[in-house]
Image: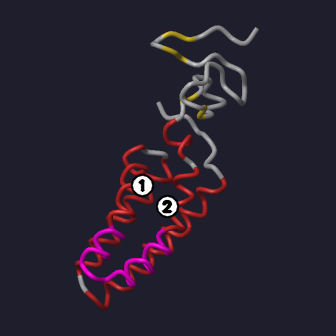
Amino acid sequence: MTTKRPIPNVLWIALIALGVMVALQLLASLRVGPSVLLVAVLSGLLLWGLYRGHRWAYVVTVVLIPVNLVVAVVTGRAGYGIMIFMIECLVWVPVLLSTRYYWGRVCPDPACGHRNRADARFCARCGVGLIANDRQVEGPP
């Protein structure tokens, strides 16, 4: 069961930037060919994963963007790699700032669904006890 939880405001920057990148990749695929279309489809899948709060999308984003920079520098295209890295930082930085959205403890109250710090005992929004070691903690005193 998926709970409806609000997307952090800063993450919207990443989602919009990635959406624009996907649209530009789709337009470029008309001119360049199917390889760019494949990249656009994979980027669209990443966009969907980030929007839905999937942890795999967080890991792929946080790992892949710096790896792209390292590969560009190692292959002798440092100027190009740094330029692309600066553009990709529009996605990378907001995703890093939204770590709790992907990795925090989810409030068991379906009306709340707030993600809290991993070490939190109670929901920061509604005060419900969070599940610890497969049991729910009593509410706050």
- Which segment did they paint magenta? 68-88
Q: Position of residue 111 (x, y in %)?
A: 66, 29
Q: Residue at x 30, y 71 (%)?
A: 39
Q: Callout 2, which amino acid? A: Trp
- Colour scheme of this structure image? secondary structure
Q: Nearer the viewer, residue 26 or 18?
A: 18
Say which element carries label 2.
helix
Q: Position of residue 35 (x, y in %)?
A: 23, 78
Q: Position of residue 75 (x, y in %)?
A: 24, 78
Circle 2/circle 1 CB separation < 8 Å: yes
Q: Residue at x 32, y 68 (%)?
A: 70
Q: Callout 1, which amino acid? A: Val
Q: Residue at x 60, y 59 (%)?
A: 12
Residue holding disc 2: 92
Q: Is residue 30 magenta?
A: no
Check residue 62 in the rendering and tell me which mark sits there, or answer none. 1
Q: Is residue 67 left or right of residue 54?
A: left
Q: Is residue 46 left or right of residue 128?
A: left
Number of other residues with Cα within 10 Å of mark 2, as a class: few under 14, some 14 to 19, many 20 or more: many
Instruction: Identify the main secondary structure in magenta.
Output: helix
